[in-house]
Image (tube, rainbow, N blue to C red):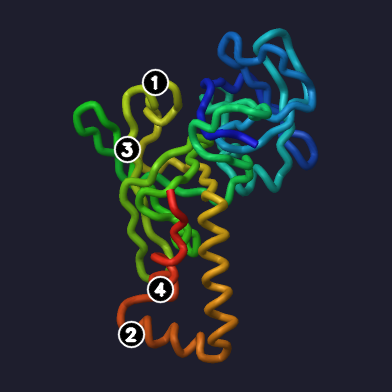
Amino acid sequence: MFTGIVQGIASVEALTDHPGLRSFRLRFPSGFAGGLAIGASVAVDGVCLTVTALHGDDVAGFDVMQQSLALTTLAGLQPGSRVNVERAAKDGAEIGGHPLSGHVDFMARVTQVRRPENNHVLRIAVPAPWMRYVFAKGYIAVNGASLTVSEAQREPGGAGWFEVWLIPETLRATTFADKAEGTALNIEIERQTQVFVDTVRDAIDERLGPLAQALEVLLRQQGLSLDDVTRPLALPPR
């Protein structure tokens, strides 16, 4: 498990392709890898990876299988690329963000960058059907960082967008300052929210049975969807 509090920025030192996987060698900031052992877990831009080799005090190797490369932004990394890193949380660790598994749900893209004074705003496009789990004032993990959604809007068809506001300290401690329009990002939704939403949707499907499809049609005529019906019921308390 991870906390969503990025502990440092690592850089890709080398990568090597093998049948079925790609090996990465990452250089960590000084002190990050103290006590790190082979078999330990590290979140790399939000993707939980296992240490497969150690090279001195600040460099470690990781193997990433093809499925993970296809589902995350790790496939686009090159030597010199910078990534957010966090070591696995220990028992009793302070959860400064929210609990993360390191299992990326989908990739999203930055569609707009705004820079009001002392702030940095990213608008991020979300593909269908994942927008049903994104709520204003809710939690979301972006490249391994636990962030609060400031604004969110669902569009017809189930896609949509959300925004996050980043303070100078967050920009200093992460790679978000590097992200331009069109940049791909790894997204992990907040699991409690997913459970609430799916439970409500399943309950509606079970209660209505064959009427569920008719309800969808009626809602669509009003410019709504089943997601709009479940949204206020599904949002867990904060």
Which numbered disc, 4 or 3, marks the residue that appears first in the sequence? 3
Badge 2 marks a residue whose secondary structure is: helix
Find out whether the residues at labels 2 and 3 contact each other: C-beta distance under 8 Å: no
Q: What distance separates the C-alpha of mark 4 from that of mark 3?
A: 28 Å
Residue beneath disc 3: 165
- Answer with the quarter of the image where residue 58 lies: top right
SS class of the residue under badge 4?
Answer: helix
Task: Choose between 136 and 29: the one closer to the eye.
Answer: 136
Q: Where is residue 151 in the image (x, y as percent from the top left)?
A: 31, 50
Classify mark 3: helix, strand or loop. strand
Q: For mark 1, what is the residue?
A: 172
Q: What residue type is labelled 3?
A: Trp
Query: Which of labels 2 and 4 is toward the front?
Result: 4
Residue marked by disc 4: 229
Q: Are marks 3 and 1 in contact (CB under 8 Å)?
A: no
Relative to residue 214, is residue 22 depicted above or below?
above
Badge 2 or badge 4: first in the primary sequence? 2
Label 2: which residue? 221
* Residue in the foreground of this view, choosing between 59 and 133: 133
Q: Could you tell me how far apart the alpha carbons at marks 3 and 1 are, in whole angstroms?
A: 14 Å
Asked which secondary structure carries label 1, the reply is helix
At label 1, which amino acid type do we have? Arg
Q: Residue at image x 39%, y 26%?
A: 170
Badge 1 or badge 2: first in the primary sequence: 1
Instruction: Tell which tag, 1 or 4, sits nearer the viewer.
Output: 4
Ranked by sequence position, the earlier of labels 2 and 3 is 3
Q: Distance between the residues labelled 1 and 2?
A: 47 Å
